[in-house]
Image: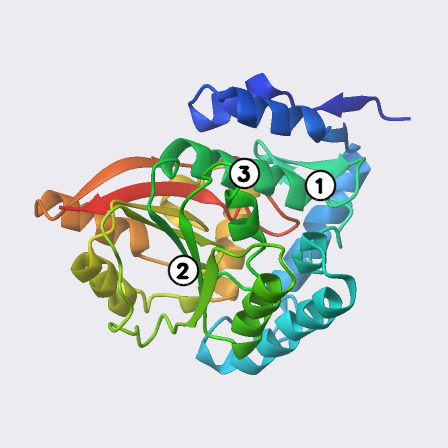
């Protein structure tokens, strides 16, 4: 039997290049990220399955390209969360159903076997909570673009007591969820707005001191990020944080990383975004605070690399 291991606070701090506040240390202590290493046979089985997926010609749930045409699918997905919160009225009803579906996840360029439910959600939630605690503590407004059922935004309240929370998404179901959250008293100081990355709404007001966040949301727009980037440059938030799939931060000579980037391309996930930001930095138009991988991910990808920046 494989020996149980636990991802420690110190490991997470090392990966993120930070020292956690007492609040985030407490959050980590509440979630025991237990896992086991996999055998050589399990690793071979995993590699074979991913290679077969990458080789597929016909699209299915694992290979369908991202893009504008998938709006209806996202409406349906977040609609399930809407019905759940209408019945249960708790924030846990907002966690997407796609977490915890696979037996293996990524950690530090290898596959591991979680020994707790929803391991992939729990480690991501710690990273997102650290982002809010570290970068958004003094934000007047926190805008999450592509927020879906707004489950990250609701946790943000634990680290910023006063910010107005703004959830933006292209699905109507997302705005209906946020309305339900408000009406049920789960969170009063929150608002939902319809927003399309491909055609940003410039009528949205961005007050001074605002922070922008995306979590696995820009991944859905492939190389069509320029309209959103132009929106950010005009609105001038105090800080932007993205946790997204970023090819340039992975190691193409590492097998696990290479499989991840091949899957990015198979799904038409975000590409060219970091090089574009670097170009804007060279032009003196933005300041990049951080660009680093978090070494965590799902069955197919390491999809939550960190980029922190702001327009000048």
Query: Farthest right residue?
Result: 1
Above or below, 129 against 301 in this view is: above
| Residue closest to the eye, 253 or 217 | 217
Q: CA distance from mark 2 to mark 1?
A: 24 Å
Residue for badge 1: 119
Left or right relative to 243: residue 179: right
Q: Name the mark nearer the viewer: 3 or 2.
A: 3
Q: CA distance from mark 1 to mark 3?
A: 21 Å
Left or right relative to 280: residue 61: right
* Disc 2 secondary structure class: loop
Residue 27 is situated, as x and y percent measured from the top left of the image, at 62, 29
* Disc 3 secondary structure class: loop
Q: Name the mark nearer the viewer: 1 or 3.
A: 3
**Label 3 vs 2, first from the N-terminus:** 3
Q: CA distance from mark 3 to mark 2?
A: 30 Å
Q: Name the mark nearer the viewer: 2 or 1.
A: 1
Query: Farthest left residue?
Result: 283
Residue for badge 2: 270
Q: Are marks 1 and 3 in contact (CB under 8 Å)?
A: no
Q: Quadrant of residue 59?
A: bottom right
Classify the position of the N terminus by image quarter: top right
| Residue closest to the eye, 125 or 59 | 125
| Residue closest to the eye, 20 or 139 | 139
Few, some or many residues within 10 Å of mark 3 (<14, 14–19, 20+): few
Residue 304 is situated, as x and y percent measured from the top left of the image, at 49, 45
Left or right relative to 38: residue 286: left
């Amino acid at each position: 039997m494989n020996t149980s291991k636990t991802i420690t606070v110190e490991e997470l701090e090392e990966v993120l290049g930070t020292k956690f506040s007492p609040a985030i240390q407490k959050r980590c202590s509440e979630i025991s990220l237990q896992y086991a290493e996999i055998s050589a046979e399990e690793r071979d089985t995993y590699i074979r399955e991913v290679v077969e997926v990458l080789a597929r010609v016909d699209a299915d749930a694992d290979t369908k390209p991202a893009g504008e045409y998938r709006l209806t699918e996202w409406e349906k997905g977040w609609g399930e969360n809407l019905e759940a919160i209408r019945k249960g009225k708790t924030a846990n009803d907002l966690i997407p159903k796609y977490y915890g579906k696979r037996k293996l996840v990524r950690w530090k360029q290898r596959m591991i076997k979680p020994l707790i439910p929803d391991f992939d959600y729990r480690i991501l939630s710690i990273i997102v909570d650290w982002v809010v605690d570290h970068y958004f503590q003094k934000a007047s407004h926190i805008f999450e673009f592509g927020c879906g059922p707004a489950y990250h935004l609701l946790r943000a309240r634990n680290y910023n007591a006063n910010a107005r929370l703004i959830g933006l998404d292209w699905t109507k179901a997302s705005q209906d969820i946020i309305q339900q959250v408000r009406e049920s008293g789960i969170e009063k100081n929150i608002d939902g707005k319809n927003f399309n990355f491909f055609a940003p709404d410039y009528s949205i007001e961005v007050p001074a001191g605002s922070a922008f966040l995306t979590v696995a949301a820009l991944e859905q727009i492939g190389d069509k990020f320029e309209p959103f980037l132009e929106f950010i440059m005009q609105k001038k938030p105090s800080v932007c944080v993205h946790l997204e799939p970023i090819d340039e931060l992975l190691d193409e000579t590492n097998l696990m990383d290479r499989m991840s980037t091949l899957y990015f391309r198979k799904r038409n996930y975000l590409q060219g975004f970091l090089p574009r930001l670097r170009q804007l930095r060279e032009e003196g138009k933005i300041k990049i605070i951080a660009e680093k991988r978090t070494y965590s991910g799902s069955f197919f990808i390491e999809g939550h690399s960190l980029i922190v920046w702001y327009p000048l």
